[in-house]
Image: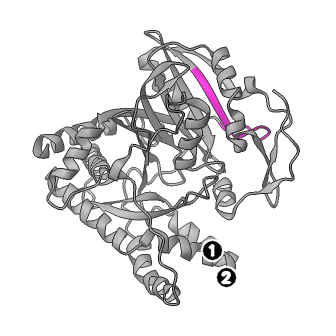
Amino acid sequence: MSPPEHEDPELLSVEDARILALEEGPVRGHTCKLVLLAEARGVDDLRAHVAGRLARERRLGLRLVDGDAPAWEADPDLNIERQVRDAGAVDDAGLPAAVGLLMAERLPRDRPLWALDVVEVGGGRTALVWRIHHALADGMTAMRMAHNVLFDDPPDGGRPAAGGGDGAVETRTETRSRLAPLRSALRVPAALRRELTRRGADTALDAAIGERRAVAFVDFELDVVKRVGHALPERATVNDVVLAAVAGGLRAWLDGLDAHPHVLRVKVPVSLHQPDDDDGNRDSFICIDLPIDEADPVARLRAIAAETRERKAGRDAETLDAFFRDLTHMSSSLERFAEHWAMSPRVFTLNVSNVPGPRGPLSVLGAPVASMHSLAEIGHRHALRVAVVSAAGQIGFGFCADADAIGSPQPIADGVAAELRALSAALD
């Protein structure tokens, strides 16, 4: 590959630098897309495929200049053989363990902060394990990068349409007026009370984490999830159904541990990307109480949907984003305290993210995509994380856990699938 043209280093944004700083001790900084191809494709062909498309995503050719003010610079030594790697062969049963090992492996900082590992899977299939550092891209940006660099272009030459439907938390641009700053200021106390009040439960999920990771996956038909949400008179979104499914899976798992919290507080990232700011991170969040003590799956869904509607009506995600941005200009020590508090298990127990993917069929080098899942790294005192992605008519749940604190998250994944079946039977 020819070296990229020289450019001056580009300082990381405040948000990207903050995310980079979270990678310390046992915490890794990357997210992951697991793409299972229905046909075999070799690593050499995939290297050529990706190398020929890297110019579409300039940031994938940047490496980190670490220091007091971290920055991105073009990597003159970019080597596609180091970025796209042959990861050997496994059978279906061995794939989660192989992915868990890769999730535990740091991305080297002397090269672009992404890696695509090619795994031969039984039955003439290939698994692509694409890790990308969260400081380089959030979920929406990583999905766009996959469209441009990995997935085949659709026949019409356009970009595949997003497929999350009503699962994505919509953002709105407030009409600019002299009253807008006042309205924003008045929203802050209520949003802080709803989102950052101490409500985290003391469960097995609030545990010190180590170096090892265990992962699990489960799929469900996206149309069924949508029908479940639309069956309620007040209509629940795809994301509401996702949260209800996680609540049911965790309820069953905690029952097995003889642990019965009243509620389980989850942090839900919200994308605030606008059309002109595709690169880097532009996320906020809301926090939702999952009613773990509620025995009825439909009642759990109703309660979660009502709470998310309240958060949207209060514009909590936008308000928190503005609040933390304002703190960066006021006091660095106050900003660090607020961010530390917002990441505390006293505020939330686990993170559940949901990124919409393309609606139509996907392929890589002509091989159909059989399934796609996301994984996201766990954090200090947060020993489980759930990442969800919709693509090609399916919604895929990915579970990443500390292997010592939680063990395999497969029982939780099985419980989520059982909850979706119960909701479908009751409402579909």
SS assignment at label 1 = helix
| Residue extending furthest toward the front | 156
Q: Quadrant of the C terminus?
A: top left
Can you give x and y, in whole percent of width and height, for residue 69 in the image? Answer: 80, 60
**Which amino acid type is marked by label 2?**
Met
Q: Of residues 249 and 34, which is closer to you in this image?
A: 34
Can you give x and y, in whole percent of width and height, for residue 158 in the image? Answer: 52, 38
Give above or below for 123 relative to 158.
Answer: above
Question: Residue visible at 43% across and 44% down?
Answer: 162
Magenta part of the chain: 106-118
Q: Quadrant of the N terminus?
A: top right
Residue 46 is tagged as none
Give above or below for 341 relative to 7.
Answer: below
Say if mark 2 contacts mark 1, CB within 8 Å: yes
Q: Main secondary structure of the magenta part?
A: loop
SS assignment at label 2 = helix
Other-residue count near label 1 (Cα within 10 Å), few / some / many at <14 / 14–19 / ≥20: some
The answer to whether 81 appears left or right of 241 in the picture is right
The answer to whether 84 appears left or right of 388 in the picture is right
Residue 335 is tagged as 1
**Which amino acid type is marked by label 1?**
Glu
**Does residue 112 show up magenta in the picture?**
yes
Q: Of residues 210 and 54, which is closer to you in this image?
A: 54
Reading the image, the residue beneath label 2 is: 330
Q: Earlier in the sequence, mark 2 or mark 1?
A: 2
